[in-house]
Amino acid sequence: NYLPSDFSGLTRRQQVDSSKGFAAITGYGESCLVRRLSASPGVHDKLIYFDAAAYPRPIDVTDWDGRLVLARGRDLFFSDRGQPASVLGPNFVTVSGDSEIVALHRSRDGVLVFFEREVWLYSPNYGSLNNKGRMVQICDGAGVASSRSVVSSDDKVFWCDRNGVYVYLGGLKYERI
């Protein structure tokens, strides 16, 4: 959860945007703005959600359609919309990449899934369960070494590997730059 902090009353130079009202946590600094996520039951009473022991420990995360998307192994897990701590048991999809998932990144077409030597695009279906979408390999032969190798600007997603820098242009198109 993002929780803005209250820096008023401090003697150092400050920049506080007072044009927007928000609930701040008093007495804390920048290091407290991110809190650990704990698994919680979701909005669907009769369905099974991951508990704290089974909640995925991700290698990377991104967001899509108001949901947290977590990557672990070759699996993508989708939380309930607006409830990042609530993941339904069947709300995951397995990607058949060449290794375990290294990175994720949201794009306008869905979720880009990066492996060591491949990139896949998963376009999730809408609804409570997002595991019936379309999976397409975008790139074979270029992947990433870590999640820090992927950035985005406007509608483009850039990544680099040991052979060069690439840009995802949308649809099934990418190019080396």
Image (cartoon, helix red, strand yellow):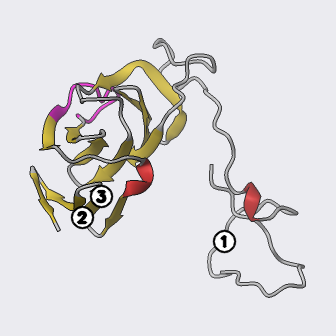
Q: Are marks 1 and 3 in contact (CB under 8 Å)?
A: no
Identify which amino acid the numbered label 3 is placed on: Cys
Query: How far across and down, in percent of the image, does residue 86 sit?
Result: 52, 29
Q: Which residue is mark 1?
A: 21
Which quadrant, please, contains the C terminus? bottom left
Of the numbered discs 1 and 3, the one sitting upstream in the chain is 1
Q: Is residue 20 above or below residue 162?
A: below
Query: How far across and down, in percent of the image, does residue 76 sit?
Result: 36, 30
Query: How far across and down, in percent of the image, does residue 132 sit?
Result: 22, 25
**Toward the viewer: 120 or 115?**
115
Horizontal placement of 38 versus 154: left or right?
Answer: right
Q: Is residue 66 visible?
A: no
Q: Which residue is mark 3?
A: 160
Horizontal placement of 174 versus 107: left or right?
Answer: left
Total numbered circles: 3
Q: CA distance from mark 2 to mark 1?
A: 32 Å
Query: How far across and down, in percent of the image, does residue 25 sit?
Result: 79, 59
The residue sitting at 29% across, 23% down in the picture is 94
Q: Is residue 78 above or below residue 88?
A: below
Identify which amino acid the numbered label 2 is placed on: Lys
Q: Is residue 129 above or below residue 24?
A: above
Q: Is residue 94 visible?
A: yes
Element under disc 1:
loop
Is residue 150 one of those drawn in magenta?
Answer: no
**Toward the viewer: 31 or 64?**
31
**Toward the viewer: 166 or 120?**
166
Closest to the camera, between mark 2 and mark 1, is 2
Q: Which residue is mark 2?
A: 156
